[in-house]
Image (cartoon, rainbow, N blue to C red):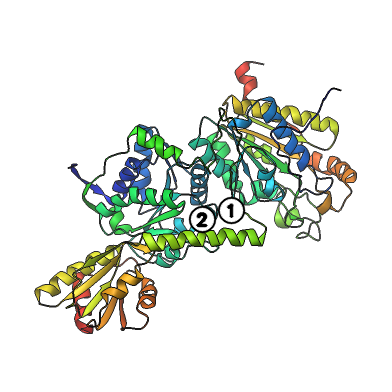
Amino acid sequence: MEIIATRPKSLTKAQFTYCPGCTHGISHRLVAEAMDELDMRNKMMGVCPVGCSVLAYNFFDCDMAEAAHGRAPALATGMKRARPDMHVFTYQGDGDLLAIGTAEIVHAANRGEHFSVFFVNNAIYGMTGGQMAPTTLPGMKTSTSPYGRDEQDIGYPIRACELLATLEAPYYIERVSLLSPQHVLKAKKAVYKAMKFNKEERGFTFIEFVSTCPTNWGMEPMKAFEWAKENMLPFFKLGVFKDKSVEEEGK
Amino acid sequence: MAEKVLMKGNEAIAEAALRAGCRLYFAYPITPQSELIEYMSKMMPKVGGTFVQSESEIAAINMVYGASGCGKRVMTSSSSPGISLKQEGISYIAGASLPAVIVNVVRGGPGLGDIQPAQGDYFQATRGGGHGDYRTIVLAPSTVQEFADMAPLAFDLADKYRIAVLILSDGLIGQMMEPVEFQPAKTDEELEELGRQHESWCMYPNEDEPNHHHHIINSLELDPHVLSDLVLNLEKKYNEIEKNEIRFEEYNISPDNEIVCVAYGTAARITKSAIDELKKEGKSIGLIRPITLWPFPTEEIKKAVHNNVKKVLTLELSLGQMIEDVRLALEGKVPVEFIGRVGGLVFSPEEVKAKIEEIL
């Protein structure tokens, strides 16, 4: 019998603590597979955020640091500067990266720090119980926007990729989604590319995963995928927002 | 003997940190510590180290957390309002048991305050400063020489106990020029050895290591029983530090003392001048100068205040913060008087002399 798929070496044997139907399992796996495929695990340090993936240090089988809310890019800066011979990634959610940690992500990207950021956007604060996030869609009901997000009162969702793509330094920025098998296959390619650029010390790389939160959206997992395709993808458009390798390699 | 050079306190502490093996420094500009960050920006590249001017003090202390988690000697510095911003990171550094050196060139507060010397950050410095149950070692220099000497001391203590060490200077010591003599710089071999001392716990991915490890730098523990054990372990460390690391200076302490003063840093310098003047007039006044503000020289103060001492005088550039620790030390044995200045003002030796004469 031939084994065609197995647990990546870069994941520990610990059982995920995510809700049923949550997409964190998929994005964890994609990051770990890229680490395996590029043989980076023994040179890798990761940073976990505050949010649902706060315990990700139990799942990624490499050296890990747990950051204060939003500070993962600052930690990663300190880590990469301390060990420039090693590779670094952060794994962050939307509240972490686009609310409390906006300054840290913008300036780390602007300095062109040599690490990868994996950003999970599910339009809600999951861990604290479904409050409004900086990426919550207009009209979307959450536990702190019970009448729906009023963009006249609290503003529109922030688009991370578009924001960071205005900066000169970032090397590669792409938004992918985890909403169907086809999307996941595309996401896998993007994660691999970011990790490859990371390994080659090309610069700052950023992958956004448009994801779901069935628990706090109050939907069954399959319904959540459909809802996200209909509502999130028109606002958070998939695609490559920056890829300096195209210019460098003249493709 | 090494050559003495005339230097500002802020530059002297930076040079001394480099000599102590600090190769990573992250900070944000603020007066009156700007010479420190400027010195680092100029000199760090020359020793092959890393200097990053961060986007905020919050980012700087979290860069320190990341670099320290890799087992490296790392420092940040700021002045009072910036140190308030760093408190989040200092709490996490305490929770994760990371070594770090933080310099506070204290200025007048609260709020933006002013940029003159003050000692209003004593409570913040000696009570942890951020959230949760923790301590940082606090060193208080009173000369530029002592400020510089505290860099290697702070790094050694930080490494030994895996703790944040705060050097609590002020705008006067930071800005003042005095002759200073530096300890020799660490050799490459010593630096390499320093780099290896934390390998058992720090993040150090290693391609060649046969047994893959999984080191985690973390202050999160959701099980209250486990967290309780972790905090009780911190307490053991703090008890150890209280036992071993108290530092203080006795000045003119004798059985003839009728009054014993307690002052640190700049306030202690001024007090010494007043004591010298009073000595000429035949009056015997002693001074205890705490050098570590935490751990505080509680027993040492109690010992110096013998039965002939009528009063204790605490002198601070604040509304009176250390005086609480002095009173706790003396347990009501003698009255504790106070002279203070706030707003960045400094008392003169004459004012101190007059106060001592008043209470004699």
Image spot of residue B284 (x, y percent): 16, 76
Is B153 in front, or is A190? Answer: B153
With B234 as the anchor, is A245 left or right in this view?
A: right
Element assignment for label 2: helix
Label ID, residue B94: 2
Task: Say if B346 sits above or below A189 in the image.
Answer: below
Image spot of residue B153 (x, y percent): 34, 51
Chain letter for mark 2, please: B
Residue at the spot 70% in from the left edge and 34% down from the top edge: A31
Element assignment for label 1: loop
Give the CA distance from mark 1 to mark 2: 8 Å
User: Amino acid type of disc 2?
Assistant: Ala
Mark 1–mark 2 CB contact (< 8 Å) = yes
Q: Looking at the rendering, which quadrant does residue B176 occupy? A: bottom left
Residue at the spot 26% in from the left edge and 44% down from the top edge: B183
Q: Quadrant of the C terminus of chain B?
A: bottom left
Q: Determine the residue located farthest toward the front in the rendered image.
A: B211
Image spot of residue A216 (x, y percent): 81, 53
Badge 1: residue crowd in 10 Å (few <14, some 14–19, many ≥20): some
Q: Quadrant of the N terminus of chain B?
A: top left
Badge 2: residue crowd in 10 Å (few <14, some 14–19, many ≥20): many
User: Amino acid type of disc 1?
Assistant: Ser
Mark 1 highlights which residue? B219
Q: Which of marks 2 and 1 precedes in the sequence?
A: 2
User: Does residue B341 appear anywhere in the picture?
Assistant: no
Task: Say if A79 sits above or below B89 in the image.
Answer: above
With A185 as the anchor, is B102 left or right in this view?
A: left
Label ID, residue B241: none
